[in-house]
């Protein structure tokens, strides 16, 4: 019986299947697809990673195929570093008068 349990276990992967690291901001895909509803939720900060999974505080452990790196926060951070000062942009919404 012990031999069967040892045979069922696999060794850790020797290669990385994703490039997500702790501290990265990611979007998590909702696995229940409904019409006219956003598929990706977030961004959430990564706390821990394994060879095949990512851990966030809001969603817990999620398989790496249901996670993608959030590019929006990287662009905003690089833009702030480039300008060295935040800018305020106003957008109007609603009917034109």
Image (tube, helix red, strand yellow):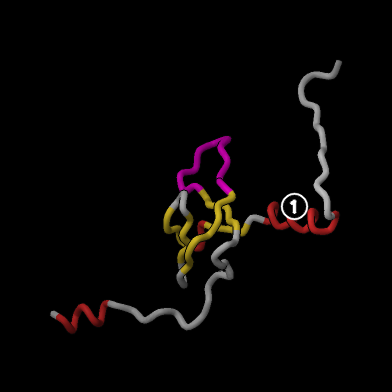
| Apparent side of residue 96 relative to residue 42 in the rendered image (left or right) | right
Residue 4 figure quarter: bottom left
Q: Nearer the viewer, residue 94 or 30?
A: 94
Q: Residue at x 45, y 51 (%)?
A: 59
31 in the magenta segment? yes
Tag 1 secondary structure: helix
| Apparent side of residue 12 relative to residue 65 in the rendered image (left or right) | left
**Magenta stretch: dominant secondary structure:** loop
Q: Residue extending furthest top?
A: 97
x and y percent of residue 37 in the render? 56, 37
x and y percent of residue 15 in the render? 51, 80
x and y percent of residue 13 in the render? 44, 79
Q: Tell me where the magenta segment starts and ends, as one range.
A: 30-42
**Where, quadrant-wise, is the N terminus in this rendering?**
bottom left
Q: Residue at x 47, y 83 (%)?
A: 14
Q: Residue at x 82, y 37 (%)?
A: 89
The vertical placement of 87 against 2, above or below, is above
73 in the magenta segment? no
Q: Nearer the viewer, residue 42 or 79?
A: 79
Q: Nearer the viewer, residue 93 or 85?
A: 85
| Apparent side of residue 44 relative to residue 91 in the rendered image (left or right) | left
Q: Which residue is mark 1?
A: 76
**Where, quadrant-wise, is the C terminus in this rendering?**
top right
């Amino acid at each position: 019986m012990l031999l069967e349990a040892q045979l069922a276990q696999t060794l850790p992967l020797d290669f990385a299947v994703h490039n997500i690291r702790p501290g990265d901001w990611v979007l998590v895909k909702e696995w229940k697809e409904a019409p006219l509803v956003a598929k990706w939720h977030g961004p959430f900060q990564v706390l821990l990673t394994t060879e095949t999974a990512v851990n966030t505080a809001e969603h817990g452990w999620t398989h790496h195929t249901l996670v993608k790196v959030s590019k929006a926060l990287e662009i905003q951070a690089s833009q702030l570093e480039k300008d060295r000062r935040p800018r305020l942009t106003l957008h109007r919404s609603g009917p034109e008068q």
